[in-house]
Image (cartoon, rainbow, N blue to C red):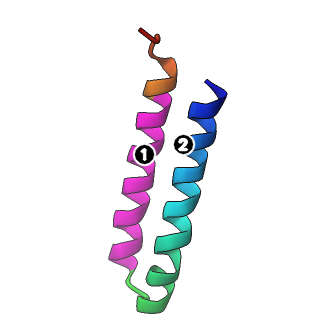
C-alpha cells in the first residue's frame, strides 16, 4: 500500500512538473482548466484504487 501511494504522488508531481511550465509559457487559461480536470481525474482514480480491496 505505501508503494502504491508513493507511486501515485510521484506520478502527480511529475505531471505537474511537466505541464505547469507549458501553461505559464502559453498563458492559455483553457489549457490550465483541462490540465486541472485531468489532475482531478487522476486523484479520483487514486482514491478509488486505494479504497478497493486487493485480490
Disc 1 + disc 2, Cβ < 8 Å? yes
Q: Give the CA separation, mark 1 to mark 2.
A: 9 Å
Tell me where the magenta segment starts and ends, as one range. 29-47
The residue nearer to you, when weighing 20 against 33, is: 20
Element type at mark 2: helix
Q: Where is residue 15 in the image (x, y as percent from the top left)?
A: 49, 62
Give whichever of discs 1 and 2 has the lower sequence position: 2
37 up-or-down from 55: above or below: below
For the point 39% across and 78% down, which residue is it?
A: 29
Residue 10: x and y, percent? 59, 51
Which residue shows up at 51% across the image and 24% down it?
A: 50
- Which residue is under mark 1? 42
Spot occupied by residue 51 in the image (x, y as percentages of width and height): 50, 18
Whether residue 37 appears in magenta in the rendering, the answer is: yes
Asked which secondary structure carries label 1, the reply is: helix
Which residue position holds label 2? 8
Amino acid at each position: 500500500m505505501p508503494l502504491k501511494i508513493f507511486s501515485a504522488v510521484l506520478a502527480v508531481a511529475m505531471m505537474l512538473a511537466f505541464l505547469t511550465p507549458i501553461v505559464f509559457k502559453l498563458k492559455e487559461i483553457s489549457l490550465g482548466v483541462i490540465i486541472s480536470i485531468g489532475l482531478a481525474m487522476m486523484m479520483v482514480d487514486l482514491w478509488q484504487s486505494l479504497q478497493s480491496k486487493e485480490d
